[in-house]
Structure formats: structure tokens, C-alpha cells
């Protein structure tokens, strides 16, 4: 697989994962939590999970911009890496202070893993190489 193909496939896969998760959080937040094995909060708090779903959907859709050109791809990957790192750090602190269930660690690990891969590829200059 070429680097250009990998960049595009990664953007499509990760963007689709986030967009679908966001849509599911908007439509059925309690169901998403059940799938993740996360205890559901009080019913009045579910609206805030739907609101987070709008944010997650937006992050996912932003990967579509990465498909159009190199500069956009680099920018999208830098921004989404930052967002993912911040989410992972936030969740880690909230798990450690016991305000979130340990099951949230899977979300933190997934975001951290995607961020690490993207940062490594950005540092390696794949976006610059793939679109000369």
C-alpha cells in the first residue's frame, strides 16, 4: 500500500468511525454507552451526550477535508490529533478521580492511539511526500 493510499484510507476509516459514533450519540446516547459497557448517567444527562455527539460527528466529518489536498490533510490531522489527545487526558483524569467509570478508558485509549499514529505520520512528513 502506498503512503497516499494509507493517508486516504485512514482518513476515511477514522472519519467514518467518528461520524457514525456521533450520529449514534445524537440519536441513541444510552445505546452507545451500553455498547461500550459504560453505565448510563441519569436520563436528564443524556441530552448532553447527544450534544457531545454533535461534536464527535463534526470531528469525523472534518476528515473529509483531508481528502482534497495536502495542506488540508495536514491541518485536519494536526487538529484532530490535538482534540484526541485532550480528550484522552481529560478522560484519564476523570477516571482517576473516579468521576467516570473505568470503562471510559477504552475511549481514552482509542483516542490516544489514533492521535499517536497521526502525530507520527505528520512528523514523518507523509502528507508532504504524498502530494508533490
Image (cartoon, rainbow, N blue to C red):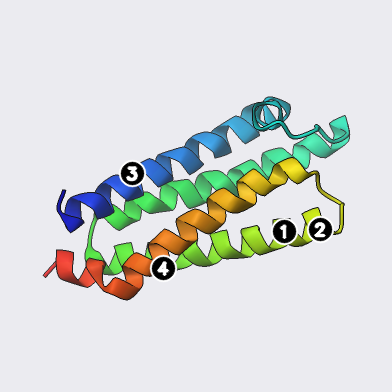
Distance from disc 3 to disc 1, alpha carbons, whole Å, reads 27 Å
Measuring from the top left, give residue 31's x and y in whole percent: 68, 25
Q: Residues within 10 Å of mark 3 (few under 14, many from 20)?
A: some
Sequence-wise first label, 3 or 2: 3
Q: Which residue is mark 4?
A: 119
Q: Which secondary structure lies at badge 1?
A: helix
Left or right position of 96 against 108: right
Q: Which secondary structure lies at badge 2?
A: helix
Q: Residues within 10 Å of mark 1 (few under 14, many from 20)?
A: some
Q: Which secondary structure lies at badge 4?
A: helix
**Which label is found at residue 96?**
2
Left or right position of 25 against 110: right
Sequence-wise first label, 4 or 2: 2
Distance from disc 1 to disc 2, alpha carbons, whole Å, reads 6 Å
**Which label is found at residue 12?**
3
Measuring from the top left, give residue 11's x and y in whole percent: 34, 50
From the viewer's perspective, is the residue at label 4 or at label 2 nearer? Answer: 2
Q: Is there a contact, CB below 8 Å, between mark 1 and mark 2?
A: yes
Left or right position of 55 against 7: right
Q: Is residue 52 above or below residue 130?
A: above
Distance from disc 4 to disc 2, alpha carbons, whole Å, reads 25 Å
At a point 83% along the width and 39% down the height, the residue shown is 45
Q: Is there a contact, CB below 8 Å, between mark 3 and mark 2?
A: no
Q: Which residue is mark 1?
A: 92
Q: Is residue 108 above or below residue 80?
A: above
Q: Is there a contact, CB below 8 Å, between mark 1 and mark 4?
A: no
Q: Residues within 10 Å of mark 4 (few under 14, many from 20)?
A: some
Q: Is there a contact, CB below 8 Å, between mark 3 and mark 1?
A: no
Measuring from the top left, give residue 84's x and y in whole percent: 55, 59
At a point 15% along the width and 65% down the height, the residue shown is 131
Amino acid at each position: 500500500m502506498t503512503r497516499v493510499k494509507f493517508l486516504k484510507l485512514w482518513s476515511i476509516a477514522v472519519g467514518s468511525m467518528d461520524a457514525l459514533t456521533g450520529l449514534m450519540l445524537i440519536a441513541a446516547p444510552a445505546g452507545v454507552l451500553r455498547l461500550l459497557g459504560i453505565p448510563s448517567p441519569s436520563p436528564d444527562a443524556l441530552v448532553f451526550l447527544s450534544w457531545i455527539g454533535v461534536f464527535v460527528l463534526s470531528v469525523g466529518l472534518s476528515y473529509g477535508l483531508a481528502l482534497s489536498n495536502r495542506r488540508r490533510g495536514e491541518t485536519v490531522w494536526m487538529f484532530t490529533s490535538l482534540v484526541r489527545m485532550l480528550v484522552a487526558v481529560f478522560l484519564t483524569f476523570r477516571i482517576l478521580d473516579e468521576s467516570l467509570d473505568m470503562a471510559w478508558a477504552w475511549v481514552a485509549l482509542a483516542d490516544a492511539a489514533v492521535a499517536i499514529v497521526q502525530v507520527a505520520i505528520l512528523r514523518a512528513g507523509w502528507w508532504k511526500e504524498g502530494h508533490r
